Image (cartoon, helix red, strand yellow):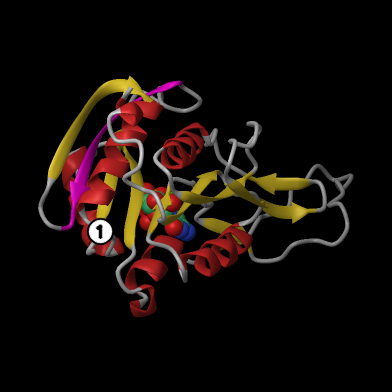
Amino acid sequence: DPSSVNPTDLAGRKVVVSAGGTREYLDPVRFLGNRSSGLQGYALARAAASRGAHVTLVSANVSLPDPAGVSVVRVETTAQLREAVVTATATADAVVMAAAPADFRPTAVSDAKIKKSDDGSAPAIELEQNPDILAEISHDRSRAGAVIVGFAAETGDASGSVLDLGRAKLARKGCDLLVVNDVSGGAVFGSEDNEAVVLGADGASVEVPHGSKTALAHVIWDEVVRRFAD
Ligand code: CTP
Ligand code: CA
């Protein structure tokens, strides 16, 4: 267990972890959502707490018990996730965006439940893009010194391999580290295990072999600690 090797290297540090998947409501009972279970984010929060950090866990629609010794902030939508993360980031030493924010939200949310019509027709749903929280906090100069980590679940395609896409996303987001998962098989969702490459804006590339989400969490915190300025 790596936590017994380095039990206090996050002592006195304030870290923020987001976890889960956001929901974008169409009406009071329906939403657009995604398959994120929150397991990796919760593993990151537990690992950080075990290494002595003060942890704020911003949790979106996760059905997991609150980790001991962690402050949990519950959110549903990407707008709420953004608000909670931006607020907590102001005083944080590190931020890990393990959540899967919905990229789009319905342009309008109906106050009343949307009803079927008798003619068999279906409504069209118009979407608009949500704000990019990771890019926003990475480009915000006022977060001076905080180490910012993003995640990317990619399937390689004609435009590039999983790692090419990861490198490009790291540059676009402006974060310090990007944890890249190959999800071509769809296997990581809800799984206890993970396998990833941690890319650094400094050119670093750390391959994490198939293992528990807790083991990956500890590698991520190792890389964060390495990048603290003081
Ligand atoms: N992210 C975010 N805000 C969003 C969307 C994503 O902060 N509105 C964060 C995620 O938490 C993750 C990282 O950005 O840490 C990458 O998410 P991903 O969905 O891979 O990136 P996108 O920019 O949404 O690109 P794509 O079109 O590939 O989904
Ligand atoms: Ca996305």
Which residue in the rendered view is the most extreme toward the left? 203
In percent of width and height, residue 176 lies at 25, 58
Name the image quarter holding residue 118: top right
Q: How many marks?
A: 1
Whether residue 163 appears in magenta in the rendering, the answer is: no
Task: Tell me the magenta residue range.
Answer: 192-201
Name the foreground residue: 162 vs 98: 98
The residue beneath circle 1 is 228
Magenta segment includes 200: yes
Relative to 224, is 11 on the left or the right?
Answer: right
Q: Nearer the viewer, residue 197 or 163?
A: 197
Rendered residue at 80%/42% (across/down): 120
Left or right for 52, reference 174: right
Q: In which quarter of the image is residue 217?
A: top left
- Residue 80 position within the rendered picture, expressed as x and y whole percent measured from the top left: 63, 61
Q: Which of 39 and 23 is in front in this view?
A: 39
The residue drawn where x is 57% and y is 44% is 70
Mark 1 close to ligand 1, CB under 8 Å: no
Quick check: can you spot residue 165? no
| Closer to us: 83 or 115 | 83
- Where's the N terminus, which quadrant? top left
- Image location (x, y in percent) of residue 23: 64, 49
- Quarter of the figure with the C terminus: bottom left
Task: Give the main secondary structure, helix, strand or loop, of the magenta stretch.
Answer: strand
Above or below residue 117? Residue 142 is: below
- Decide if residue 133 is in sight here: yes
Q: Quadrant of residue 134?
A: bottom left
